[in-house]
Amino acid sequence: MSKLSLSRRHVLSGLIAFPVGAALLTQPAFAANPPVYTEDGIAWDGHDPVAYFTKGAPTPGVTEFSLDYEGATVLFSSAETRDMFAADPAKYAPQFGGYCAYAASKGYIAPTVPEAWTVYDDKLYLNFSLRARELWLQDIPGNIAKGNANWPGILEG
């Protein structure tokens, strides 16, 4: 009997003997991605999502004005923008969890940079890079439809 066969038999015997082993067989190979794009627990590269609407520009937030949203810490540039977000997060949170909107339209997730953004139909979309934003802008309605069809399933990656 080969060493490999013996090892397999021992492993299978162990799984049968210990019910916890059966649970291990049903776990996904990879953990799902969080619903909000973060780095070190901070959402959207630490930028205030409301400021894209009110200032028309990416604006860094500060820890003094923060709140938890979908398991991530969101930073705001003022108490006013924090309170606006808290009152209506669906209005201000980036679509596709703040992952790259163009990547979502292609069926995968990618990080984003604050400078590559678009507000379209009163919704905020972020992109991986300025080049990805250029591609996104070529067909915003079509890209939104494709992204919506892929979301949130692409988080299972």
Image (spheres, rainbow, N blue to C red):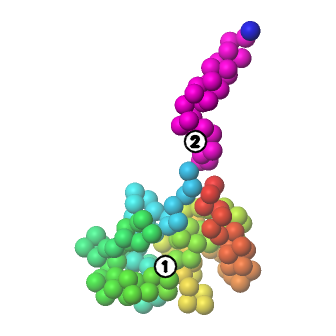
In the drawing, does residue 42 fall left or right of residue 101?
A: left
Say which residue label 2 marks: 23
**Circle nearer the N terminus (1, 2):** 2
Q: Residue 71's spot in the image, x, y percent?
A: 42, 65
In the image, residue 104 sits, relative to residue 94, either above or below, namely above
Three-letter amino acid code at the position of disc 2: Ala
In the image, residue 53 sits, relative to residue 26, either above or below, namely below
Q: Residues within 10 Å of mark 1 (few under 14, many from 20)?
A: many
Does any portion of residue 31 appear in the rendered image? Answer: yes
In the drawing, does residue 20 fall left or right of residue 60?
A: right
Residue at 34% x, 77% y is 76
Does the magenta run of residues contain 63? no
Residue at 62% x, 57% y is 156
Does the magenta run of residues contain 13? yes
**Which of the two marks, 1 or 2, is nearer to us in this view?**
2
Q: Residue 39's spot in the image, x, y percent?
A: 44, 59
In the drawing, does residue 64 fall left or right of residue 137?
A: left
Which stretch did the figure color magenta? 2-30
Query: In which quadrant will I find the C terminus?
Result: bottom right
Q: Residue 145's spot in the image, x, y percent?
A: 72, 79
Q: Mark number for residue 128?
A: none
